[in-house]
Amino acid sequence: MFDKVLIANRGEIALRVLRACKELGIATVAVHSTADAESMHVKLADESVCIGPPAARDSYLNIPQLLAACEITGADAVHPGYGFLSENARFAEILDDHGIVFIGPKAEHIRSMGDKIEAKRTAKRLGIPVVPGSEGGVTEDSEALRIAQEIGFPVIIKAASGGGGKGMKVVHSADEMSVQLSTARSEAKANFGDDAVYIEKYLQKPRHIEVQVIGDGRGKAVHLGERDCSLQRRHQKVWEEAPSPALNAEERERIGNIVAKAMAEMQYRGVGTIEFLYENGEFYFIEMNTRIQVEHPVTEMITGIDLVNEQIRIAGGAELSFTQDEVVLRGHAIECRVNAENAKTFRPSPGMVSQWHVPGGLGVRVDSHVYQGYTIPPYYDSLAGKLIVLGKNRTECLMRLRRALDEFVVDGIETTLPLFRQLVRNPYIQDGQYDIHWLEKQLDADT
Ligand code: ADP
């Protein structure tokens, strides 16, 4: 096992990784920008290195600085968290060239899944059902129209290198195609440095259901059930739960087995998530994330498996510590992403947190780097913390979430807590009757 892990991230996930390392008896190195010197993970790490100014490209995305930090501290592995360099195949290769282990999948898998066109091809080849659409990239209007007519309007144009829910264009009819295609391509180029786009059937009322997988890199892979992330705003997840209120045991087993078999065949290493849209009893692959995800704790809560611990152990060459039969889903878990934002306008609200009182009690977990007196810097995403609640069943989980949200006190900044207090009381949420468009419609109706 590793002696020392450098955590190439910030915020709650840096703390999450640090906790896993401590429990494995591994020394930790925190890296931070000048804006994050007072961050919790820096205070708790065994060592810390300042790697640059606030802008992420000069610090958390700065590969030479990260390598220097490894060199100075003698770290033998790097955990990239999520975001930043976590899905950068080049970074994984550079670390490898320097004899440092990247705690994540093989570079070839990061690369092939990072290109969403290539990812869909790979998924299809491995027997995973995909959203109907173009076979590859689309550049010409005539080709786009032909595909749209074949699969039927509406369609969605997506960037091959896209992420973060950005740059997707829904096209409702043939006369919109030309403008939307050229806008999508130029936005893709501007945002992701790659103008390749592809076309998919735009599903009207799907749920977002994703399957957690873990592989040993040598042909063994298991799934840990699904997460339902249908509550979204601007294609970004707001609330996640496991298991999905929309799936029955047979559907869960069917899709889980398809995915686990595919990952075993790929010889996938580490944790990964296969994302699907689910409509009328069918699953349609949209993408794979080759990293730990923000919402991983809901899976941990219902399985009792520490995903970050497994990730580190597997990167260190260990076997999977459990078999598929040993994965037992118990109870129901929900995660709320508590963002430092106004709960109505979603305007970021950085600043000093004058009061921070988190809920507790049975089945309540808060993953957060925030503490009283901490100042949330304006330079990064606005995730202040995650409230995760476990109940024996969904009803108990919702009642527990309701009381946990009521205990949560934050002052000095605005947060999205008021939104969650409303959602947890909403009859549609209580019935589990929501698709990926539900939240936006609800928010529009409220304003
Ligand atoms: P990103 O990598 O930017 O997050 P995804 O492909 O994962 O993009 O899609 C993000 C979200 O966008 C999905 O959860 C869903 O809400 C919406 N979306 C993506 N593809 C489609 C589609 N074909 N039909 C309807 N909604 C879609």
Image (spheres, helix red, strand yellow):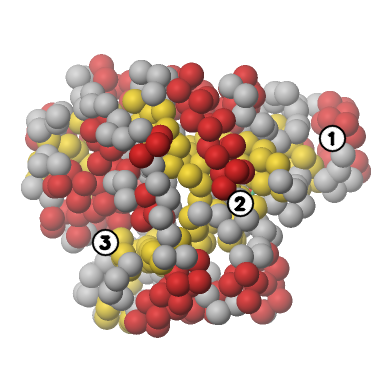
Near mark 1 (Cα within 10 A), the count class, few <14, some 14-19 or many ≥20, is some
From the viewer's perspective, tell me whether residue 276 is left or right of residue 387: right
List the residue tagged with mark 1. Answer: 151
Near mark 2 (Cα within 10 A), the count class, few <14, some 14-19 or many ≥20, is some
Amino acid tagged 1: Ile
Q: Position of residue 72 (x, y in %)?
A: 9, 33
List the residue tagged with mark 3. Answer: 369
SS state under label 3 = loop
Q: Quadrant of the N terminus?
A: top left
Residue at image point 20% right, 54% down: 41
Question: Which tag is nearer the camera, tag 1 or tag 2?
Answer: 2
Q: CA distance from mark 3 to mark 2?
A: 34 Å
List the residue tagged with mark 2. Answer: 247
Question: Which tag is nearer the camera, tag 1 or tag 3?
Answer: 1
From the viewer's perspective, tell me whether residue 183 is left or right of residue 19: right
Q: Is residue 121 above or below residue 223?
A: above
Amino acid tagged 2: Leu
Q: Is residue 313 above or below residue 46?
A: above
